[in-house]
Amino acid sequence: MRVLDARKILREKGIRPRKSLGQNFLVSPRGLRAILEAAELRDSDVVVEIGAGIGTLTVPLAERVGKVIAVEIDRRLVEILEEICAGYPNVLLVQGDVLDFSLRQLLEQGGCPQGPCKAVGNLPYYVTSAILRHFLENTPRPSLMVVTVQKEVAQRMAASPGEMSLLSVSVQFYSKPRIVCHLPAGAFYPPPEVDSAVVKLEVLPDPRLPPEEEQVFFRIVRAGFGERRKTLRNSLSRGLNLPVTQVEEALAAASIDPQRRAESLSVEEWLALYEKLRVNLQAHQRLSK
Ligand code: SAM
């Protein structure tokens, strides 16, 4: 599979990649193939591309799907994208910070307000978590995301109980993540200081909780992870300002050993715990008003 020669294109245009914008351009045919395959592209798809760069992904996406809405923050690169995508009327280029646009706005601009859509991108690493949160926590959500991220972040996103973190729970609350492949630093120009991985996130079609309950759920999860190496019994009691006995009762009712630590719980166990704890939290809040 042919990949654009990022080094040559940038040199010809007299553009130096900006580290501060996470500008490491994909030059690996294997990486490109893996991303395209993971996205399970169809003619009818609408794809939002996050951080289009010089169009390395944009062009093969445009050749395979109905519409590509490509967001790029750097005006210098948008000029290159305009040239490279000139022959593809199904590409809409949007210049700006992807975090400034809701998915709804992007879909409206692309003339497909109804969705559904997929989101694909070799993410700028300085803003990975914010981008994941932006696309997963707001509605509408993409039905599928394929993102390249730092290898360690990919491992945390797809972690199993025993190695869970706040990021693992946040990502797995909304989706089923799977690492598709690892990419060495040399898969990019210029090479970043870290290795990368492509992650496929199958976004759950139905939310696990109503939106108004998500905040309370994540308050409990944050409290659990708040004090590293503490047992759940202690971290939840301190973090939520609840008596230890109440936390112990909720843990027992959710069949969770109070000596376990936050990193050992699956999302399903957090949900079971949430169901038992939320009543106590509401009562406690009423009393302290
Ligand atoms: N997609 C290209 C590729 O695969 O070669 C570029 C990937 S590079 C890792 C990340 C791209 O995201 C850069 O082009 C950078 O300018 C752009 N970018 C950085 N921050 C952004 C933001 N907040 N919103 C939109 N694009 C951003």
Image (tube, rainbow, N blue to C red):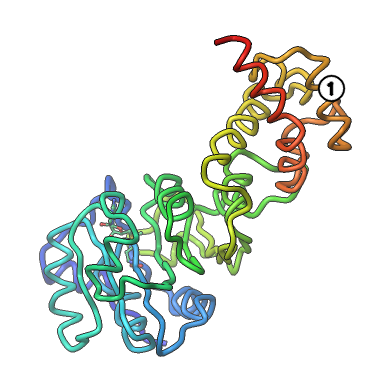
Front-lying residue, 272 or 123: 272
Q: Quadrant of residue 57?
A: bottom left
Please indicate whether residue 214 sits to the left or right of residue 149 in the image: right
User: Relative to the observer, which residue lies in front, 27 or 215?
Assistant: 215
Does 279 sit above or below residue 149?
A: above
**Residue found 62% across the figure and 24% down from its top:** 226
Give the residue at mark 1.
Answer: 248
Give x and y (percent) for residue 271: 71, 43
Rendering coords of residue 26 (x, y %): 37, 68
Q: Is residue 82 above or below residue 148?
A: below
Q: Quadrant of the N terminus?
A: bottom left
Name the quadrant containing residue 230: top right
User: Which quarter of the frame holds ligand 1?
Assistant: bottom left
- Residue drawn at (16%, 66%), measured in percent from left and top? 78
Residue 135 in the image, given as x and y percentages of width and height: 43, 55
User: In the rendered structure, which amino acid carries the disc numbered 1?
Assistant: Glu
* Quadrant of the rendering where the C terminus is positioned: top right
Which residue is pictured at 23% across the width and 51% down the height? 18
Task: State whether residue 178 is above or below residue 284.
Answer: below
Please tell me which residue is depicted at 40% across the width and 87% down the height of the picture: 44
Q: From this viewpoint, which residue is outermost toward the top?
A: 288
Q: Is residue 207 above or below residue 56?
A: above
Q: Residues within 10 Å of mark 1 (few under 14, many from 20)?
A: many
196 vs 120, left or right, is right
Q: Quadrant of residue 238?
A: top right
